[in-house]
Image (spheres, helix red, strand yellow):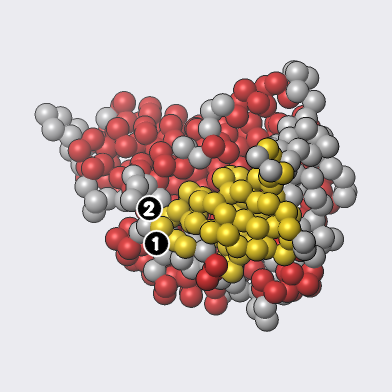
Amino acid sequence: MKELLDHVRELEPELRAWADEGEKLRQAPPEMVTALRERGFFRFFVPESLGGTVEDLPSIFEVYEALARIDGSIAWLLMIGTTSNLVNAYMPIEHQKAVFGDSPDQNLAAVMAPTGRAVEEDGGFRVSGRWSFGSGCHEASWITLSSTVYDGDKPRMTARGTPDFRMMAFMADQVEIIDTWDTLGLCGTGSHDIEVKDIFVPRGRTMSMLDDRPCEPDLLFHFPIYSLLAVGVSVIGLGIARSALDDFYEIAVDKRPAFSRAKLKDRQLTQFNIAEAEAKLDSVRRELYGAINDAWAVAERKDDLSFKQRARHRASATNATLVSAEVVDTVFNLAGGSSIYKRNRLQRNFRDIHTMTAHSIVKPETFVLAGRALMGIDKDNPLF
């Protein structure tokens, strides 16, 4: 993992330039994708048997966070692309081989909101639908999309009493990308809408993230996937917040606010707010990585996280994301008019973090679900 962190530092000047280009293109520049792919960044969560990178979960999150300090969109694309690898670990190995081919260095994409409709046929499912937020869809060779299985006009129900949601793997040429990604932030992720019309998917290229178990023995594949995704989002928030603080320090050195004799860095209010922001970010980062390490220790014992442990994990992820946004807001406001210029990355950090907090997996309502679990009101939640 140290090698990949070294690559992050080595590539930083190019990544910053590519981030600017990605803002204009509204998707990842091809040169950036190639550079990350050639250095093995997209091998996370590919099975070891297929050439994947075998790392512990905390180290993978550190790479996401390090990239987010450079640019939120770049980190987001890697997080979505590599966790999409994880989804495919639920497929039989012969179908995984079809997805990854002769190389683990593939760009994949996935959308887990079940907005498609699937009807069972002999040997598989007939699928149609449209999905939003298809991050990295332009670069992906395969795209995995979630659908609800229908029996006639009604959703098929599982034994747990929930609709049968299944992920379906499509080759890139089976989907249509609809240009919709014109947004406040995370502009370089190319998270366009994706549409599928009447496509047959073999059963072996489908999986239930709620009821199936991974087909791979690697420990990474037995970690609760929704918890993993929530933490993936939250560590990107930590990286964006750290970037915002770094950007602010550069501004504060020379800036003298209007009608003030003192430079920004010499004002007592600045000093108080910055110390408080640093303390908040450091505290929430320690809490989050503590939860990650505790959960990884459970996985190493080949045990399953309890429902309450998963709830605490999700609460930590949501808390880290929301506190990261508070830190960005603090420095954005302290910097005053300097914050709004595109020459300063601080405005991008502000836009990116507030786009990210709109994600359903880390929205404030997650605290309600976690609280119900911790107080024993709910005994299970498949989305935890």
Q: Nearer the viewer, mark 2 or mark 1?
A: 2
Disc 1: CA contacts within 10 A as few (<14), some (14-19) or many (>=20):
many
- Residue 162 lies in quadrant: top right
- In the displayed structure, would residue 118 be above or below residue 270? below
- Residue 378 lies in quadrant: top right
Residue on which disc 2 sits: 181
Q: Is residue 184 left or right of residue 62?
A: left
- Residue 215 lies in quadrant: bottom right
Residue on which disc 1 sits: 27
The reply to whether residue 229 is visible in this rendering is no
Asked if marks 2 and 1 touch (Cβ < 8 Å), the reply is yes
Nearer to the camera, 48 or 140: 140
Task: Give the spatial CA distance, label 2 vs label 1.
Answer: 9 Å
Q: Position of residue 232 (x, y in %)?
A: 59, 48
Tag 2 secondary structure: loop
Q: Position of residue 320 (x, y in %)?
A: 55, 36
Q: Position of residue 68 (x, y in %)?
A: 47, 53
Q: Residue at x 37, y 52 (%)?
A: 180
Quadrant where the N terminus sits is: bottom right
